[in-house]
Image (cartoon, rainbow, N blue to C red):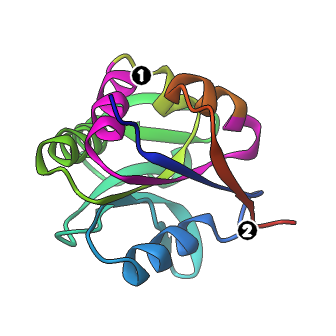
Amino acid sequence: MRRAALHIITGGRDSGKTARIRALYDEKPGGDGYACPKVFANGVHEGYDALNLRTGATAPLARKKNALPLGWDEFLARGEYSFSGRGLEFLDSILEGLAARRAERVFLDEIGSLEMQREGFRFLLAGVMDSCEELYASVRRNRVAEFVEITGAVDYTLTDLDA
């Protein structure tokens, strides 16, 4: 079975991983996937949204616990953030659609411990990797080895934005 060529983008906090994923998506035709842009209110970082790169649709994904909007549907809290159940379902629906659409290139942003520990993520990721030619993923530096392990990648490129 063919596996996608894996390209990992890593770096520290505020190193530009999301901006790089979005730029690569714009530069390379035949792409699909998601990004997790920061959300600001009055110049203050309050959290992240999930952005479907193909459709432009968004869903609230995470908010700082001190900035939760009315009606927030917390699925879980981790550190200073609360994660929305609807936002996580939105990301899952994007991943499910990626495998079905068989995009040439797939872009996944901000893969961290939450994503890799969620029960369905590994299954959805395997389906995506088996259906595309190239996978671009931004992964937190401390999670790169774990991500490589769950993808089963033997060969991959690594771009460290802090290097």
Q: Which of 46 and 127 is in front in this view?
A: 127
Are discs 2 and 1 less than 8 Å apart at CB? no
Q: Position of residue 85 (x, y in %)?
A: 28, 35
Q: Residue at x 19, y 66 (%)?
A: 57
> To which quarter of the image does residue 55 belong?
bottom left
Quadrant in which the N terminus appears: top left
Q: Which residue is drawn at 54% across and 66% down?
A: 18
Quadrant in which the C terminus appears: bottom right
Q: Where is residue 103 in the image (x, y as percent from the top left)?
A: 23, 57
Is residue 86 one of those drawn in magenta?
no
Q: Residue at x 68, y 35 (%)?
A: 143
Residue 75 horizontal side relative to residue 143, left or right: left
Query: What's the amino acid at mark 1?
Result: Arg
Task: Please name the residue that numbered disc 2 is placed on.
Answer: 15
Task: Please name the residue that numbered disc 1 is placed on.
Answer: 118
Q: Position of residue 131 (x, y in %)?
A: 25, 42
Give the overall secondary structure of the magenta segment. helix
Query: What's the amino acid at mark 2?
Result: Ser
Q: Upstream in the sequence, badge 2 or badge 1?
A: 2
